[in-house]
Amino acid sequence: MKVKKFLLFVLYCVPFFLFAQEQITVKGVVTESASGQPAIGVSVLVKGSSNGTVTDIDGNYTLTNVPDNATLVFSYIGMLTQEVNVGGRTTIQVALSEDVQVLDEVVAIGYGSARKRDLTGSIASVKAEEIANRPSANPLATLQGKIAGVQVVNSGRAGQDPEIRIRGTNSINGYKPLYIVDGLFSDNINYINPADIESMEVLKDPSSLAIFGKNGANGVIIITTKKAKAGQTIVNLNTSFGYKHIYDRIDVTNAAQFRELYDEQRINQGSDPYDYTNWG
């Protein structure tokens, strides 16, 4: 009798569990809280999944196959990320606020500095915290995959420094960017310890490069190193080790083997073997 009651209880509960996992369509408008204008290109993602979309030119979004108990994540560069619980709602309006900490961040530009909110040119910045998360013996390697439009090319040779392309291959004379370290021009930055770098700014567009003239035609990398600060003395020790090796070394022929293969090729083509003794 107890077993029958338990089975009946399970059967009654099944529809409720199925209802809890119902998939719904969520719509809404995303705006900027400061101006009330539509927020264009905001990422709307179901937390913990790859189901997402972006807002259109009017700030509208439509997201299908959303569990009614899911959480939506609204994110955009320069804005604070918001997480909203769906709670069975089919319409959700969101107003995003500016991320003041990011917009007030100071960026080096030429012979001065400015806040990110005041910039109109294409300038990318990499701070010491991001560099520390990617251990490398070369400062250029820390930029790989960090900045859009910046290509870092590794030849794979042991001890070979990587090459960087900021604005593509613009000249037959090369594509090496202009390096500025603590306000001084430098031909090479491979000697700099990445752990000593406070920030790296990459200037990419003409408006940012105008102050440097033709020297900045291939882009400019501005490096600011760490300085002494007031406070308690702190000693940090960081060590790393790496090595390079050929994954699949190909055996090559010697002179006698090459001659044999070359003669075989000539015979297959209907020609006589080459006379290596006739130098006349």
Image: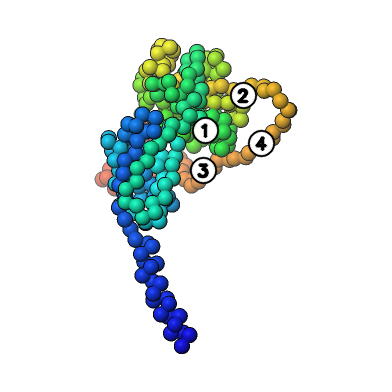
Label whose residue precedes the other's in the sequence (2 or 3): 2
**Marks 3 and 4, how far apart at CA:** 28 Å
Residue 39 is situated, as x and y percent measured from the top left of the image, at 34, 34
Location of mark 3 (residue)? 246
User: At x 34% / y 39%, what residue is drawn?
Assistant: 30
State how far apart marks 3 and 1 are (Cα). Answer: 23 Å
| Residue 82, numbered label | none
- Residues at marks 3 and 4 touching, judged by CB atoms closer than 8 Å: no
Q: Which of the two residues, 145 or 5, is positioned nearer the viewer here?
A: 5
**Left or right for 272, reference 202:** left
> At x 50% / y 14%, what residue is drawn?
112
Relative to 190, does residue 72 appear above or below in the rendering?
below
Does 23 appear above or below 252?
below
Does residue 168 appear to the left or right of 232 in the view shown? left
Q: Which sits earlier in the primary sequence, circle 3 or circle 4?
A: 4
CA gap, disc 2 and disc 3: 37 Å
Question: Which label is found at residue 226?
Answer: 2
Badge 2 density bin: few <14, some 14–19, many ≥20, Cα 10 Å: few
The residue carrying pointer 4 sits among few (fewer than 14), some (14 to 19) or many (20 or more) residues within 10 Å by Cα, namely: few
CB under 8 Å between discs 2 and 3: no
SS for dot 4: loop
* Label number found at residue 142: 1
Q: Secondary structure at mark 3?
A: loop
Q: Residue at point 61% right, 30% down?
A: 195
Whether residue 108 appears in this view of the structure is yes
| Three-letter residue code for mark 2 | Lys
